[in-house]
Amino acid sequence: MRLILLGAPGAGKGTVAKMLTEIDGSVQISTGDILRGAVKDGTELGKQAEAFMKAGDLVPDELIMGIMGERLKEKDCEPGFLLDGFPRTIPQAEALKTLLADLGLALDGVVNLNVPRDVILDRLTTRRTCTDCGAIYNVKSNPPKEEGQCDKCGGPVVQRDDETEEAISKRLDVYNEKTAPLAGFYQNEGMLWDIEATSSGVVVNTIKEKLGL
Ligand code: AMP
């Protein structure tokens, strides 16, 4: 399957994407994970992206398109891909359209995960992430078995730098200003699936139904 997952930070894009990868071997592509990896490894990309990320701002479109132009050509994308956190601006969506046309690939749909703001705020402040494999936990609803240690890879499970209250509030403002308009963009393309997203299990079942799986 080839899907875009749209939705505010904390809407559950990563969780839903991980569940969908188990269905047909499609790969999850999270620009946030790629960027955090680059920051951790101290690469040139990481150095350029770090300050934007820490402040809760978007990384410039050119950097993101450079990453995605390469990533979508990789062999593991052949069974399909779940774009998690990309595109995030109208120029990225337009550039993606050209990129997919060049690669001869079509999207199955664009999933818009709708979650009330109070649920988002609660999820983000209680979310913890493994810095090694990106696995997502929640201190209230899904803590790791050993505090601070990833069940899957044993890596450190921490609160992200951009999940302080100040950065979260900035990220939600940036989302409303720059990313929310993508729903209209994909509605016009006839590709938008609006889904109420309080439960990731229900979301995955709805997506499966739409894809006839
Ligand atoms: P995420 O894990 O998707 O919430 O992304 C974390 C941070 O990485 C965002 O707040 C942005 O600073 C940056 N980022 C991730 N994806 C993008 C994108 N498609 N465009 C611009 N910045 C991005």
Image (cartoon, rainbow, N blue to C red):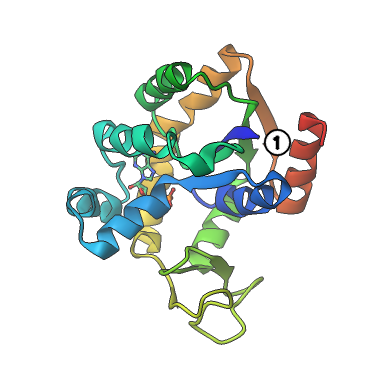
Q: Quadrant of the C terminus?
A: top right
Q: Is residue 27 above or below residue 50?
A: above
Q: Which residue is mark 1?
A: 195
**On the picture, is 134 further left or further right than 68?**
right
> Residue 95, percent across and down?
37, 21
Q: Is residue 111 above or below residue 118?
A: above
x and y, in percent, of residue 39 in the image? 26, 59
Q: Residue at x 76, y 31 (%)?
A: 211
Where is residue 177 drawn, in percent x and y? 39, 32
Q: Quadrant of residue 175?
A: top left
Residue lying at 39% horizontally and 41% vertically, measured from the top left:
173
Residue 8 seen by the camera? no
The quarter of the picture where residue 197 lies is: top right
Residue 45 location (% of width, % of height): 22, 48
Residue 78 visible in the picture: yes
Quadrant holding the N terminus: top right
Other-residue count near label 1 (Cα within 10 Å), few / some / many at <14 / 14–19 / ≥20: some
